[in-house]
Amino acid sequence: DGDIDNLKFSSDGKYILYTSDVKVSTTWQDRNPDLSKANAHEANALMYRHWNTWEDGSFSHIFYASYYNGLITDPKDIMRGEAYDCPQQPMGGAEDVIWNGAGDGIIYVCKKLSGKDYAISTNTDLYYYSIATGKTQTLTADLKGYDTEPMMSPKGINMAWLSQSRDGYEADKNNIYIGDLYAGKLWNITKDLDETVQSFRWSNDATKIYFLAVKDGTEQLFEIPIPVDFSQIKTTDIRQITKGVFDINGLVDEVNEAGTNWMIATKADMNHAAEIVRINLNTKEIQQVTQVNTILNGETKQSRIDRVWITTTDGKQMLTWVIYPPDFDQSKKYPALLYCQGGPQGALSQFFSFRWNFQLMAANGYIVIAPCRRGVSGFGQEWEEQISTDWGGQAIKDYLSAFDSILKWNVIDKNRCGAVGASYGGYSVYMLAGINNGRFKSFISHCGVFNLKSMYNSTEEIWFTNWDLGGAWWNKPQPKSYLESDPMNSIDKWNTPMMIIEGERDYRIPYTQGLEAFQVLQLKGIKSRLLTFPDEGHWILQPQNSVLWQREFFRWLKETL
């Protein structure tokens, strides 16, 4: 009964595994079967809701079953009775559960915690279930952060996975670990790499691991040799295979054609949606395989994209992307948009987004300024981690350093500048509203944090606010974030028109944050607009909602700039 997901065959073809939701705990519906028209949520502990769904007593479990001549028989729930999810909710997928090399055991990702313990921890582990014994053992008990994406070596003995070292820090550096499942040993093979690993895969002969990492504002393909003796693996042997103003993402497979090894992947940049490519692993040549968007790209004027290096207030060099309108004319003046990246940690690379689309902003006549401020990955761990507990400090100064530097260009209309962003970017808009000193004439904040205290009291992932804000606002002494980085502290200086957009099913940054900000704007008599989507969460995902988002985004800018 019910849907199944993540179907995978064992190596010998005798078994399949799949995941399916199982009702584990009782709810008010079970206690009141006669109230079929009642509609309610209930909670007895944290986490009672996550990202965009409420806890309903059901959990995603792993099943395996015998398979013969197209028939599936005798399915068994290997997590029977456990109130835990695999894949992890809401971000996990098929990568969270795999067969071991022999096909007689299952390795899976799970966070076997509940209530408050679940809400304050990021400590997932890898578990091994033996079909022969029906028993489960923990493989990563000594590792305290996220352990994700297990992948068996093609030789079937060793396993690699991604691991973070610190519990509670969801944006911690991802390292690649290799484990010998028989010897019970493991090695961190990227511990000396000063960047976080996005994803990886083994080479077909198990002599290399290919991985993706963000470097200087772009996501690129790397390889690291894997000798027989894992203790001899050296970070200094890492080779960067691709380089350019584009992102390589979505590693698919390694193939050999006429003696040449190719990596099948996807490639995108700010002007082009992803297409499948193949990368010559020796010569580094990249060949496009699919042509899904070729005709559309040929009919669409492209934006010029520049890398600009800005000196920050503390003397560092910061990459800032500048995206120009098509048919850019150096003799004209253009309105400008400061783009504030979300996260607060993560990459501001050559991504192509169907919502925060720089080409579309530029095509509407704006020069887009996108700084890789503190917290953005690809510039070393120190740069990325400097934003934690300092949301309103150096990162906000970085925005203004980039904006003020580029504002001096003759092509910028200084009287027609705005700032836009979502999540931490939406928070940045609220912060800038109180300190911008007339730089901006319009703001758009999507799902931003407005009130740090009410954010701490209502978000579902407490590990996030514990790490990034420094803990609860009632702690003594009070964490400095609530004194130095709360937009609420400077609303007396707000005087600029602002549009606020929210998804009402956003539980990470509850949409009431936007309602609070809108109420302040209205009571202060500042031109403002509120747009909420009842059936969306932290992202706007439904097609017509997305079109409406774009139309209202540019309608507001047209009115105010």
Image: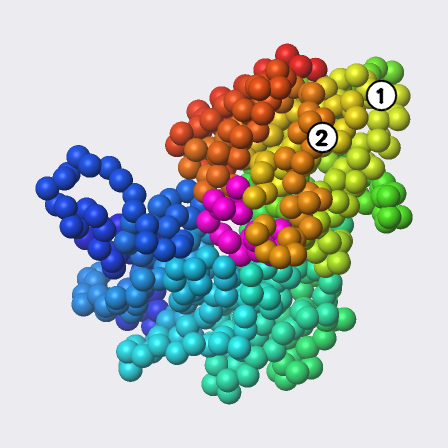
Q: CA distance from mark 2 to mark 1?
A: 26 Å
Q: Nearer the viewer, mark 2 or mark 1?
A: 2
Q: Residue 483, image x and y in percent?
A: 68, 45
Asked whether 163 or 418 is in front, the reply is 418
Decide: few, some or many residues near mark 1? Use Cα within 10 Å; few <14, some 14-19, many ≥20. some
Q: Secondary structure at mark 1?
A: loop
Instruction: Tell me how the rendering is colored.
Output: rainbow
Q: Is residue 468 magenta?
A: yes
Magenta: main secondary structure: helix
Position of 525 compared to 384: left or right? left
Farthest residue to the front: give it.
476
Task: Residue under label 1, please give it.
Answer: 411
Position of 450 compared to 34: left or right? right
Where's the C terminus, which quadrant? top right
Task: Residue under label 2, please give it.
Answer: 434
Asked whether 346 or 516 is in front, the reply is 516
Residue range of the region highlighted in magenta in the rendering: 454-472
Q: Secondary structure at mark 2?
A: helix
State the image quarter where residue 63 is shown: bottom left
Q: Residue at x 66, y 25 (%)?
A: 443
Position of 352 compared to 88: left or right? right
Q: Residue at x 57, y 29 (%)?
A: 517
